[in-house]
Amino acid sequence: MGRDRCSWQPWLASDAHPNGHECAKGAATLHHGFPNAAHQDHRPRPSPETGKGAEERPGCHAHGATHHEAHLDTVEAAWLGLSVGTHGHRHLRGIGKCGPRRLYVSHGKRRGGRSRPDESLPERRAALPGAWGPGLQRLRKVGSASGTMLLRAAWRRAAVAVTAAPGPKPAAPTRGLRLRVGDHAPQSAVPADTAAVPEAGPVLRPLYMDVQATTPLDPRVLDAMLPYLINYYGNPHSRTHAYGWESEAAMERARQQVASLIGADPREIIFTSGATESNNIAIKGVARFYRSRKKHLITTQTEHKCVLDSCRSLEAEGFQVTYLPVQKSGIIDLKELEAAIQPDTSLVSVMTVNNEIGVKQPIAEIGRICSSRKVYFHTDAAQAVGKIPLDVNDMKIDLMSISGHKIYGPKGVGAIYIRRRPRVRVEALQSGGGQERGMRSGTVPTPLVVGLGAACEVAQQEMEYDHKRISKLSERLIQNIMKSLPDVVMNGDPKHHYPGCINLSFAYVEGESLLMALKDVALSSGSACTSASLEPSYVLRAIGTDEDLAHSSIRFGIGRFTTEEEVDYTVEKCIQHVKRLREMSPLWEMVQDGIDLKSIKWTQH
């Protein structure tokens, strides 16, 4: 008797079940709790030998469970980390074989070709009223995508309830991997080779106050993405069957949602892998296309690293790049910009909202200057799209970079807006099948662009509310810190500023030391792309910040899901640790004694 092959090999058209029934042709069993699109009704067929169904055979499933329920038992057990059997099946060491090296759970020693069922499982399930029953019953009645959502919700409820359920816990498996379920913590597969491993309790994670680095996925975005991760998996560029048509329709709907957010035409939206790729396409693509006539570009000293590095790459190719300085407020001087434009200038690239200090540039004024001088205008709006109102036509923007994970969407997807009239031409950076109107070859990832479109739609609906709420929380944080701590400096213009990005310098405190002290709050001292460097932020140096203050800066990010309690806790801990670190600082002691540190001439030994 072989393994339960309808669990292990769902792609087989037909396979005799070891216990006397046959899986329906073309059907697939549940794998990790996700039903296959073709598997809407997976009932055991009558045995060809006896004519009886599996439900009538007492040896097939314990407790009178159907074939479908037995697989759910296995999935449930693996998800909750329980050591259980499969109620009469052959010993099963894995859940499915739909991918290499999936989850493996030890079910105890094999005895007579069968695993030992865990008698506590039915009792533990009975101790979870409403956690599984309704969800599984509804799962059989609804479609695949909705059923998956119900099962995911049931999993979460059961995972929490099992940790508190009475009764003996199953022994830890001695082989394979084990799942540990913790409140608000990702499940991690850990080796279980040691004889005695202490049970892990709920894992406490830091508060998240770094939304400029990335934002959490909005649950509404996940809801929109799930069907295209499970059922609607067609290639959107396949034109010969319904799978491709479904995905293409979803892709075009997402294109419309992105375009609506910035006032563009859907045909002007090109999907990319993120804002970094969009910036590269905009800067390198325009420069190289018009290189025969124009070989000059303009940007600022406070741009994102990918923009600065793209410009340096073009300099190596023979282009001339002007890096405009910024004022102490972080805003460029429009007169300097106008004076820097030359007859052979092809592109001006200025960031909408700075990712480190939150300063908003006068984008509309820059757009009018560029339009009057017949120069293309590109803006990196990764930190601005969905957070402040933007209209590419009113602001005279010719190219705009967008990132999905900055607006509560998925990572790995973004977009670039490229104006059609008057037409902006770019040279493609990669060769391939000519997708996205030949500007960005490669298969468009339907689930990701659907998530980007949903994130843009949610942002458009809630932008005004989010901005008011974030402004209130931002003011609360700044005021409470500054009224309790002296010598705190806010970097950037306080008026032309996006409130969700707050950069404060705490004099006489080393920023890295403060970050380590605030271990229960996720913060940063600058851009995530340069966070590994110990050098002070080039953005802060560009606005004229003293080096000691640049080393003591902390960026606080407030977003859609930040609460007042989180802000208050962050303020409390920040004040506490700044005071403690200053008490340890000899510089702070000298300042308290009235010594002017700038008058001291330091010597190096």
Image (cartoon, grey):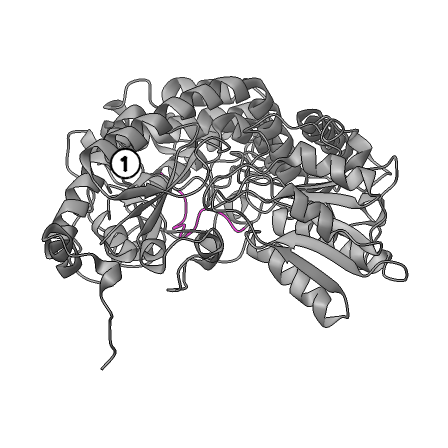
State how many labels appear. Answer: 1
Q: Is residue 90 magenta?
A: yes
Q: Residue at x 88, y 37 (%)?
A: 422
- Which amino acid type is marked by label 1? Asp
**Residue 92: x percent and y percent?**
41, 50
Does residue 94 lie above or below 54 as drawn?
below
Q: From the viewer's side, name the closer residue of 53 and 322.
A: 322
Q: Secondary structure at mark 1?
A: loop
Whether residue 386 sits left or right of residue 156 in the image: it is right
Q: Give residue 37's quadrant in the image.
A: top right
Q: Residue at x 27, y 51 (%)?
A: 515
Tell me where the magenta segment starts and ends, as one range.
Answer: 87-97
Q: Is residue 586 magenta?
A: no
Work out which quarter of the rendered image holds the C terminus and state it.
bottom left
Does residue 135 lie above or below 8 as drawn?
above
Q: Which residue is mark 1?
A: 183
Q: From the viewer's side, name the closer residue of 250 and 346.
A: 346
Q: Residue at x 49, y 55 (%)?
A: 542
